Image: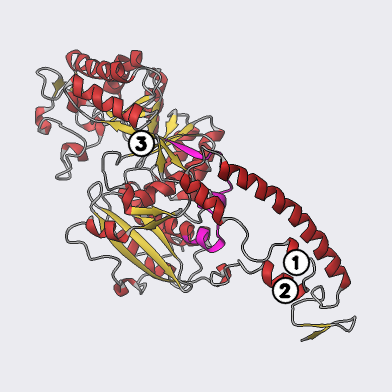
Amino acid sequence: MEVTGDGYTSNLPGPFFHTNNKPMKDLLKNVIEKCRREDEMASQLRQQEIDHPETSTKRRDFLKKTVLGGLSLGGLMGASIEDTMAHTTSKVNRYSNPSDLKITDMRVAVLRNVGRTPIIRIDTNQGIYGLGEVRDGADERYALMLKSRILGLNPCNVEMLWKIINPFGGHGRLGGGVCAVEMALWDLCGKAYGVPAWQLLGGRYRDKVRLYADTPGIDDPTEFAKVMKERTVDQGFTWLKMDLGIHVVADQPDALVNSKFWNGAKGQYDTRDYMSYGSTLHPFTQVQITDKGLEGLAQYVESIRNAVGYEIPLCADHFGHFDVNNSIRFARAMEKYRLAWLEDMVPWFYTDQWRTLSDAIETPTCTGEDIYMLKNGFKPLIDAKAVDIIHPDLGTSGGLLETKKIGDYAEEAGIAMAMHMAGSPVCFMANVHCAAATQNFLSLEHHSVDTPWWEDLVKMTGSLPMVTKGFANVPLDSPGLGVELNDDVMKEHLFPGSPGYFEPTPEWDHRKSWDRTWS
């Protein structure tokens, strides 16, 4: 009991909440009457949407669930202050007290998806957990080694935890562990506060996120046209990307110079050893493309343009490891097809070469899927205006907040942002939230369009499906990333030989090194 200066007593904190406090009753009456009027108006609008013939069944069910249950606010006019306070706070989730959240565990399940894709789960003392994803092709141990650095800490202090773990990230797949943890932290934070991740990033610019899909490599023009119709008409994609590189003409006589030395220079994924073609920096292969090779590539692009037309942006990837001079020749031969961008023509860290290339051609240039963090990677390219479009992969670039910072910095320089993504629905939805919160966003990659079980790996926790006709739906009514795992489907697609399904990881509980990077 608390005795106040006016002699009243109360079990509630502070002098304002007293049983006989008339100013409090008058204030509550005004609030209740205002809420009653707003509730009536909201109820009418809700019923109109429920009754509208174009409202989907799922949306209709959701709207019905939003009706205020039990005693209405208007019915509280004659109630005591204690009853009023009890009712108006009845829906507060006291189990999730963000200030008292502590990280208690990190576990992993490795999917057979785009090679191998580890999914992490960060658990807390309050029963809620967050999901993150180590980038495709990376090792789950990149994330597990961070467990000892974050155990016992509050996951809602995302930026502070990021500063603890970011020294362990790096370019390419080396950034996968740090980014997975960052994703899971935002998922946890959103669940703790009951808001979508995009809200924590400052709000959203859009309710739908435009997607781009790959064009499959099919030689038969009739079959190719059929698949393109499915992509654009049936699936509704309004942006496409093709694998356009020297691999398309590698088997044609006299199309390439110096390719046989590199075992035919079939593609950038030939990384069998340190000195293999795919592991050798572009300027150091001296593979060149001939006029005949360029004609072959032009015929290939023309067949795709004939199938999809010019309304749909068409970008290109996977050229090959050749130098900036051949990149310029290649780009000029493609000018008439008005490609949306030419991607990863030279390694991302050759800023001067990117500037030379961008100044020499009309087609927009694009790079960034292997760059970790703003200052270390993207900032030099942006400051030098060396590329027209940045292309971060959220699974490497630093996670949701860092990628948004990258996009915002690029926006100030007049540079747009597309987003590379080749992971599971967990990483996909992390990208959707980031894209929704970033103004200069163009399009997000959907790498698993043709994988029938891909969307079934998760359950959407809101009222909208993941994808509708070539656009991802931004979760508006579900917290965190807006997904939960579908355990049965996940278990069907675990990577062979993986350590199980979110098994305990006590061997990663203890930190055994001094992590400070300065003296």
Residue designated by label 3? 348
391 is higher (above) or lower (below) than 150: above
Contact, CB < 8 Å: mark 1 with mark 3?
Answer: no
347 is higher (above) or lower (below) than 500: above
Contact, CB < 8 Å: mark 2 with mark 3?
Answer: no
Which is nearer the eye, 60 or 107?
A: 60
Residue drawn at (22%, 65%), measured in percent from left and top? 499
314 is higher (above) or lower (below) than 496: above
Earlier-in-chain disc, 2 versus 3: 2
Residue designated by label 1? 76
Q: Amino acid at mark 1?
A: Leu
Earlier-in-chain disc, 2 versus 1: 1
Which is nearer the eye, 75 or 448?
A: 75
Q: Amino acid at mark 3?
A: Trp
Helix or strand or loop: what does disc 2 sit on? helix
Structural distance between the alpha carbons of marks 2 and 1: 8 Å
Q: Position of residue 5 (x, y in %)?
A: 89, 81
Residue designated by label 2? 83
